[in-house]
Amino acid sequence: MPKTVPVEAERRNLLYLDATCPLVSKVHREAERHYAAGGPDSRHILMIGHAGHPEVVGTMGQLPPGAMTLINDAEEARTVQPEDPARLAFITQTTLSVDDTAEIVDILRTRFPLIEGPKREDICYATTNRQEAVKDIAPECDLVIVIGSPNSSNSQRLREVAERSGAGRALLVPRLDSLDWSVLEGVSTLGITAGASAPEALVQEMLAEMAKRYTLCIEERIVKEENVTFRLPAPLG
């Protein structure tokens, strides 16, 4: 969240909890380090992300206005004209397409050889793993269903990755009652995945309902195991 939010909460004597994902907080700290309080070692920051996304709003809100420039896509990476090309850094939204982000980073590094960035791009491990899994199954699927919210960036990217990777079709479905069963007509191989923040219960609910309607042969394709856990915010820990 932008720094203005806790400041306003304190002004109103409100209790607030910072539930920012630690991986996003890491990007915030990177931005602060590059900015260096506006001192002689500071760098202007190019943030790769989508305008209006809550994570982008929160990250850009960590620094004073003008300290960052948002880069939405490859075209903006090709045309951005920073005031001092020798003093630049880049950070990324954590829920982007891995491939699209790599293209933008390549453009920026080619145009601005002195630009600083993270040792590896800051795409969330859960986002990366799911995109890799979708790439693995999409060529075999007549349809891929991504369970996730329409305003979830990583869920939208999964749908796009499935389409680019060879799936016959790819649909974003928030929950079981949003599924139009007619889309399954003629489908013999169906891929199901879920956004990083979608509860596993939504996946199991959809599979259970499908089992009532169809004869299923389920293959679980494991690309990577995830065992990362994060601590709750201090007041809840």
Image (tube, rainbow, N blue to C red):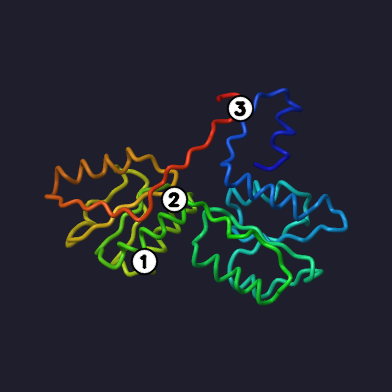
Instruction: Report the residue marked by disc 2.
Output: 150
Q: Earlier in the sequence, mark 2 or mark 3?
A: 2
Quarter of the image for residue 139 reads: bottom left
Question: Mark 3 and mark 1: span between their CA atoms?
Answer: 41 Å
Earlier-in-chain disc, 3 versus 1: 1
**Which of the numbered marks, if any, corresponds to residue 234?**
3
Q: Viewer-nearest of labels 1 and 2?
A: 1
Q: Residue at x 71, y 52 (%)?
A: 31
Task: Estimate the x, y position of residue 232 in percent, counting from the top left.
Answer: 54, 31
Q: Secondary structure at mark 2?
A: loop
Outermost residue to the left: 215
The CA span between labels 2 and 3 is: 30 Å
Q: Amino acid at mark 2?
A: Pro
The crowd level at tag 3 (other Cα within 10 Å; few <14, some 14-19, many 20+) is few
Mark identifier at residue 163: 1
Circle nearer the N terminus (1, 2): 2
Question: Quick check: 28 left or right of 226?
Answer: right
Name the amino acid, label 1: Glu
Residue drawn 42% across the image and 55% down it? 129
Q: Are marks 2 and 3 in contact (CB under 8 Å)?
A: no
Query: Mark 2 against mark 3, which lies toward the viewer?
Result: 3
Which residue is at a point 50% across and 62% down the rendered structure image?
Answer: 98
How many numbered tags mark residues here?
3
Q: Quadrant where the C terminus lies?
A: top right
Query: Residue placed at 17% from the left, 62% from the top?
Result: 186
